């Protein structure tokens, strides 16, 4: 049996070099922004992407309260959660959630694009979302990410 000398490089969690990026969500469409963030959190933009390793970057999102929804989603989209008890479903329209907790809309959109396991939960912790233009991550010297 022949042994191959060139193998596909597999990234190890000790070898991961993470960068910090700032994204301004002002006027951006929710789904398009969320898919870009999910791709960066997962590490799919890198040449050494490994599916079972958390190889993504840290993402800081500012101006989350100025995000846009297209079409009639602002009036028709419903976010729901369940308490676990009979009849314990809670429905919240997107317009109400956007005015009260705009960070939650973006966090949910990104969360639903990540893997549904412990690796996905670990990736989601690298996402920092803020309503206004200020954020407390200046010490990490984040780069601005445009799309």
Image: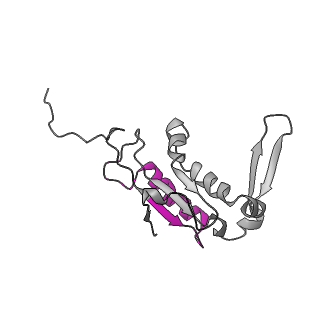
25 magenta-colored: yes
Where residue 86 sits in the image (x, y, percent)?
85, 35
Q: Residue at x 31, y 53 (%)?
A: 47
Q: Residue at x 57, y 67 (%)?
A: 25
Where residue 65 sits in the image (x, y, percent)?
66, 66
116 magenta-colored: no
Q: Quadrant of residue 92?
A: bottom right
Residue nearest the observer in this picture, 6 or 144:
144
Q: Residue furthest bottom?
A: 27
State whether residue 13 is above or below residue 62: above
State whether residue 36 is above or below residue 8: below
Q: Quadrant of residue 82?
A: top right
Where residue 125 sits in the image (x, y, percent)?
54, 46
Where residue 27 sits in the image (x, y, percent)?
60, 73
Q: Quadrant of residue 146?
A: bottom left
Q: Residue at x 31, y 42 (%)?
A: 15
Residue nearest the observer in this picture, 105 or 136:
136
| Residue 29 visible in the current orientation | yes
Question: What segment is highlighted magenta in the picture?
Answer: 21-49
Residue nearest the observer in this picture, 28 or 66:
66
């Amino acid at each position: 049996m022949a042994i191959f000398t060139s193998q596909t490089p597999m990234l190890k969690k000790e070898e991961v070099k993470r960068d910090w990026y700032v994204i301004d969500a002002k006027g951006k469409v929710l789904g398009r922004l969320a898919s870009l963030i999910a791709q960066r959190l997962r590490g799919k933009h890198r040449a050494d992407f490994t599916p079972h390793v958390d190889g993504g970057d840290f993402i800081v999102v500012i101006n989350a309260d100025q995000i846009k929804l297209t079409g009639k989603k602002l009036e028709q989209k419903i976010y729901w959660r369940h308490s676990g008890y009979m009849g314990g479903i809670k429905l919240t329209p997107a317009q109400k959630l956007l005015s009260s907790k705009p960070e939650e809309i973006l966090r949910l959109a990104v969360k639903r694009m990540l893997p549904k396991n412990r690796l996905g939960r670990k990736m989601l912790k690298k996402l920092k979302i803020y309503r206004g233009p200020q954020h407390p991550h200046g010490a990490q010297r984040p780069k601005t990410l445009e799309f």
